[in-house]
Amino acid sequence: MNKKYAIFILSLLVLSSCDFPTASDSSPSDTSSIDTSPSSSDESPSDTTTSSEGPGEPPLGEYRINPKPSEGDTGFVYDQYGEIVKELYRGEYYTDLEDVAAYIVTFKETPVNYFFSTERGGYSNAKRECYGLYGEACRIFPGPYESNYDHLPYSLDYNYYEADIGGEGYANSSNWNRGALRVVFTIKGISNYGSDVPVVFYTGNHYDTFIEYKNYYNGWGEEFGLRDASWAAIDTWF
């Protein structure tokens, strides 16, 4: 064999035995480990905006919402954001403070189980009649309110009304103690909130002090009245 040809063959054999890297060898074999998501600099921020259909963010501090009167036989109890918590029905019995307050501002009247009577001297006849009609759901509605009127803002028609809010032992027989729990309210409104806007106050101590219903579930203002601060209007959110 020619010496040059032998050297050429030997060189080819040596080269073929070497392991050179290829293009495929330079990439990871497991493509699942590759992060194909956009980099943090390319990501769009999450949309945290709220719907423009609502009243927006509530104001800082204390606020009330306007009553939402019913045009039919169904009304609603709202939360502090104006969302519906429960329904109320005209003609149903209601005794819970939250329900009664919402019923008054919604329907502009007391629930049907409130027995109207101007009787004085203990209301003995009225209590018997009321108990006979409504049992333990009976509540006395004495009509016009005339006690400690100076604690409250003047109503536009100069009239406030009061109605009982049960309590322990209330209406547990045909003759009972009416207790000290009342709502006092005006249907025609007060100058601070406008006309025909019912305003409800609650007293748990027989008219010594009051708190204002802010027209949403569990929404009550600061106490005012005897030996406490005077009433002050609450800002209306919507």
Image: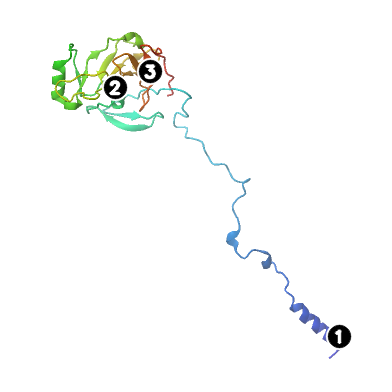
Q: Nearer the viewer, mark 2 or mark 3?
A: 3
Q: Secondary structure at mark 2?
A: helix
* Separation of marks 2 and 3 at Cα, in angstroms: 20 Å
Report, in whole angstroms, how far the alpha carbon at label 1 lies from the one at label 3. Answer: 114 Å
Disc 2 marks which amino acid? Ile
Question: Residue 150, how many percent across, how many down?
Answer: 34, 8
Residues marked 1 and 2 touching at CB (< 8 Å): no
Q: Mark 1: which amino acid? A: Lys
Q: Which residue is mark 2?
A: 104
Q: Foreground mark, 1 or 3? A: 3
- Location of residue 183 (image quadrant): top left
Measured from the top left, where is residue 45 in percent x and y? 57, 41
User: Which element type, helix, strand or loop, lies under badge 1?
Assistant: helix
- The residue where tag 3 is placed is 223
Residue most extreme to the right: 3
Q: Is residue 13 above or below residue 105?
A: below
The mark nearer the N terminus, 2 or 3, is 2
Q: Which residue does the image show at 38% across and 30% down from the upper left?
A: 79
Q: Dots 1 and 3: beta carbons under 8 Å? A: no
Q: What residue did someone put label 1 on?
A: 4
Q: Quadrant of residue 211?
A: top left
